[in-house]
Image (cartoon, coloured by chain):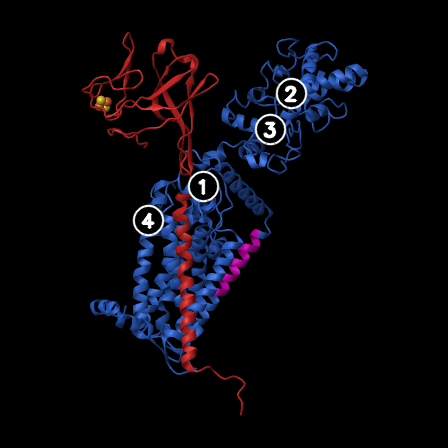
Chain colours: A blue, B red
Amino acid sequence: MKSFFDWIDHRTGSKKLLHEVLFENVPGGARWRYAWGSTLVFCFSIQVVTGLFLWLAYSPSSQTAWESVYYIQHVMWGGWFLRGLHHFTAQAMTVLLALHLMQVVIDGAYKAPREVNFWTGVLLLLLVLALSLTGYLLPWDQKGYWATRVATGIAGITPMIGPAVERLVVGANDYGHHTLTRFFALHAGIIPGGIIAFIVAHVYLFRRHGLTAKLPKKAPDSPFWPDQVFRDAVVCLAVLIVILFFNFRSHGADLDAPADPSEPYPARPEWYFLFLFQMLKLPVFKGSMEVVGAIVVPTVVMVVLVAMPYLGNSKQGHRFNLGFLWAMLGVMASLTYLAMNEDRNDPGFQADVRAAKWEAERVITLAGEGIPTTGAITLLRNDPLTQGPKIFARNCASCHRYDGHDGLGGQPKDKISASDLKGFGSREWLTGLFDPEKIAGPLYWGGTEHAEGKMAKFVKEDVPEFNAEQKEKLRQGLIALSAEAGLKAQAALDKRDAALIAEGQKELKGSTINCADCHKFHGDGDDTGPDLTGWGSREWLTAFISDASHERFYGEKNDRMPAFGTDKMLTEREIGLVADWLRGEWYVPKSRAE
Amino acid sequence: MHQPHVPPPPDRRNFLTKAASIVIGGALAVVAPVAGLFVLLDPLRRKSQAGTFVKVGSLSSLPAGGAAQKFQVLETKTDVWNVTPNEPVGAVYLQRVGEGKVRALNAKCPHAGCFVNFKPGDAMHYHCPCHNSSFGMDGKILNPNSPSPRALDELPVELRGTEIWVRFQNFRAGVKDREPV
Ligand code: FES
């Protein structure tokens, strides 16, 4: 063994190198406060390793980025852990950078002859922040997408070069494949390459000038190994434990719904950029002053940082530097607090966050069945449970309600003036319609002209006069009519009551309960009122939404129901989605369905 | 005089510090690579999904008398996260062979993968236009100078009611034995 190492040493000089690495002099002995630099190297190496493994499974394009990250996060073995480790270590790095910077300035380690080393450090700081920024977009989820749009938008307002810079970063007119390939190349290749080069320079210069001892020295000088190594290792371990704690606590990093330019999102940058975001919201930076907040202020801060080694040569200068950094930290902390506090107390924002969370969960449920090649976004766009309420809120809720709200849980400004459609097609809904107390009430036709129509009159005046036999036949008729809808939720009931339904169908055509006087049903009956054949079925409902004034339905007696299909207010697809949603037809995973 | 704390001799202390540094350092070094290895090895956990039967056609669409009929085979294709239903994966010839029995032959020529044609008529047979191979209705090679190394590939058939289900598979061309691809 020894001869093997000798052989290596003879050819590489490894012993001397190792000796130099391990026996660097630590003036004044090992101290905990010297560990920050090592923690950063440690974190960066975690990022390189986890990043490379993530790379093995990541696919940068707008139809595959989210999908591959979904697969890592939710399907692959330990994928969530790997991704979470990468995510939380990135956060830790930002914090450690700040600590390292503070320690260097407090200890005066930036003064001559260590200026160049300080500058490489500042560059490293910027590069790491750039890593965060580029990495945030890669999952191509709503969160990363919108936050990054804000960032590139800010780059775009830089005078003169802004638009060109923005275009170059985005890679096209708008976000898409090339934004991802560019961000990915920056994130996984160019920036880390730069960081490695600067770390080498940084460590080389650090070794060249030696460690800056915190005065007064507490102990005699000692070599780096083992006392300082031990301290560094313990601090790194503590950092790792914190990272693991956060990783386990939130089961890895979040993955929002896939990026969708057509769906608004409560965009916020990562927490360590929040202060910038909040700063730009300050009234001083309104309008044309935005450029000052977004570009000028950060530039000034950078200039001060770069000038610090010069300023630090005098005692006052050093004090100024310290004061400046503490003030910056203070401002950043308060702006961050302000931003978080504002969001916490903004019910609208909170509701948006909840909605976004819900969509993220929904798309992951849907993705379990496989994702079409058009991307996971298609899953959400074709999902009645996701789209139905939105379409309803936009188009139907000015008159109708769904369980008292607009479909999304909100309250439209106009009062309810047409029926509440929760459970439309079901036996309960129909029974309510045939309740003399309810038909002209707010939940059914109270707000419509139909409240004065023949049907309402029939329910209010004739039905109460029905004798027992008629009442029983009406009950059968309603069960049969509800069965026409073929609701998923009622499938078992309908199956059980098949005989009853057959009876009821006869009654709907017969003369005992008078439906046929006005309504057609499977070819029989008068057609003054809407045709009840297939009432509430997908076909019936989509046709009705398309054109309620069609003679199959209300004809001229239609009140205010727009012809959504005929007048091209909604596409066939949208009408289908809202109909499916009203009818309770959407994907339910097998395990939950049972 | 007794001191309450006697510091351990420097050598022993040094040894402990060294040992602890190495142990902790090892732990630090191991976490990220191990997490990565799990993800890297994930494909080993996935079952291959080959060998499922797919519906190809119905019995009624097959001519009587044993003439062959070509059917496209559509399968649900899974590519990691993408699932695409009804992807064409190949074609088969189906023919009746006796009461309630169907034979399925992969329409790809075992020589170099051209599509073979069915030649109806008195002497029904299959013919590959690329290098003139003839195959019998059972798939066996007919012409002695055929370059094909083996007969047409027969595929397992299952009748479910009147539906014909085939376990579709492609085999490597140009070799004597059937090797699934
Ligand atoms: S490919 Fe069929 S004979 Fe050559």
Residue A291 at least partly seen: no
Q: Which residue is mark 4?
A: A185
* Secondary element at image label 1: loop
**Foreground pick, A65 / A438:** A65
- Give amino acid for label 2: Ala
Q: Residue A259 shows which numbered tag?
A: 1
* Secondary element at image label 4: helix
Q: As displayed, is residue A469 above or below residue A56?
A: above
Q: Earlier in the sequence, mark 1 or mark 4?
A: 4
Chain that bears disc 2: A
Q: Which residue is mark 3?
A: A582
The CA distance from mark 1 to mark 2 is 40 Å
Q: As displayed, is residue A100 above or below residue A59?
A: below
Question: Label 1 near label 3: C-beta < 8 Å?
Answer: no
Q: Earlier in the sequence, mark 2 or mark 4?
A: 4
Whether labels 1 and 2 share one chain: yes
Q: Which residue is mark 2?
A: A483
- Give amino acid for label 3: Leu
Chain part drawn in magenta = A328-343
